[in-house]
Amino acid sequence: SYELTQPPSVSVSPGQTVSITCSGNKLGDKYTSWYHQRPGQSPVLVIYQDNKRPSWIPERFSASNSGNTATLTISATQAMDEADYYCQTWDSGAVIFGGGTKLTVL
Amino acid sequence: EVQLVESGGGLGKPGGSLRLSCAASGFTFANAWMNWVRQAPGKGLEWVGRIKSKTDGGTTDYGAPVKGRFTISRDDSRNTLYLQMNSLKTEDTAVYYCTTEWSLAVEESWFDPWGQGTLVTVSS
């Protein structure tokens, strides 16, 4: 079955840029979405169709998808960006989520 | 305001049943494709399944761990989504979220918004 692999954790200093990767076989041939989930809260859509931002997501968030890796990049990271981040795609009629990456803003 | 509110969670016994509901408001529920996603304590997100709108056939799809045990249905007159959970297992313990699926083409969809979730605990 298809799998998406994310690093369990990444850390960043406030104001710096951080990237979170999501790897899967030929993932670049599929569309990827990203969600963040703050502690105790529900997931929130951050990116859809590889690189599109919903209106409520700041321009600091960007994403790309090519080859076997999708990447979410957060620039000028703020303390409020600290959350778990999940990538998501589809394969053979089923939704696939990555295992999640805990972003810590030090 | 688009809102999804889950209910029906609680304690269930292994082999037993529970039914979850998700009340939708702020959008045309009848046109929406709706999904259930769960999250075991301290774990990541896992897709449970989806139901398409009746105009798109009203068909359902399920993730492998729940196929044959769980059934998703909808009542468009009540703007409500349901998840009937039978033959419960301890590994079904999770917070269950309902969410709306948006798509421009097959297997290109994303989910927004998500409800607040309802906790299901399966234990003897």
Image: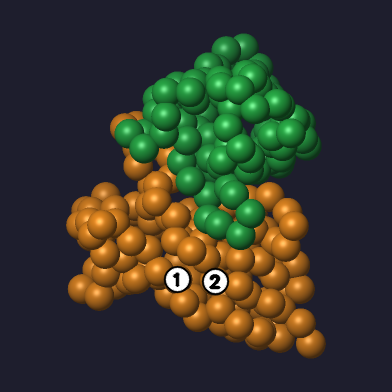
Estimate the x, y position of residue B43 in percent, counting from the top left: 73, 54
Q: Secondary structure at mark 1?
A: strand
Cα separation between marks 2 and 1: 6 Å
Disc 2: which residue: B118
Disc 2 sits on a residue from what chain?
A: B
Disc 1: which residue: B6
Q: Secondary structure at mark 2?
A: strand
- Which residue is at the front of the view, B8 or A78? A78
Position of residue A10 relative to residue B26, above or below, is: above
Chain B palette colour: orange
Mark 1, other Cα within 10 Å: few <14 / some 14–19 / many ≥20: many
Estimate the x, y position of residue B114 in percent, counting from the top left: 44, 55
State which quarter of the image contains the C terminus of chain B.
bottom right
Q: Are marks 2 and 1 in contact (CB under 8 Å)?
A: yes
Q: Quadrant of residue A40?
A: bottom right
Q: How is the image coloured?
A: by chain
Chain A palette colour: green
- Which residue is at the front of the view, A58 or B36? A58
- Which residue is at the front of the view, B55 or B116? B116
> Residue visible at 26% across and 57% down?
B1
Disc 1 sits on a residue from what chain?
A: B
Position of residue A51 relative to residue B121, above or below, is: above
Position of residue B87 relative to residue B62, above or below, is: below
Q: Is residue A92 visible?
A: no
Q: Quadrant of residue B53?
A: bottom left
Point out the tag, 2 or 1, that comes first from the N-terminus.
1
Q: Quadrant of residue A98?
A: top right
> Residue visible at 35% across and 42% down?
B102
Estimate the x, y position of residue B121 in percent, counting from the top left: 69, 77
In this picture, residue B8 sits left or right of residue B80: right
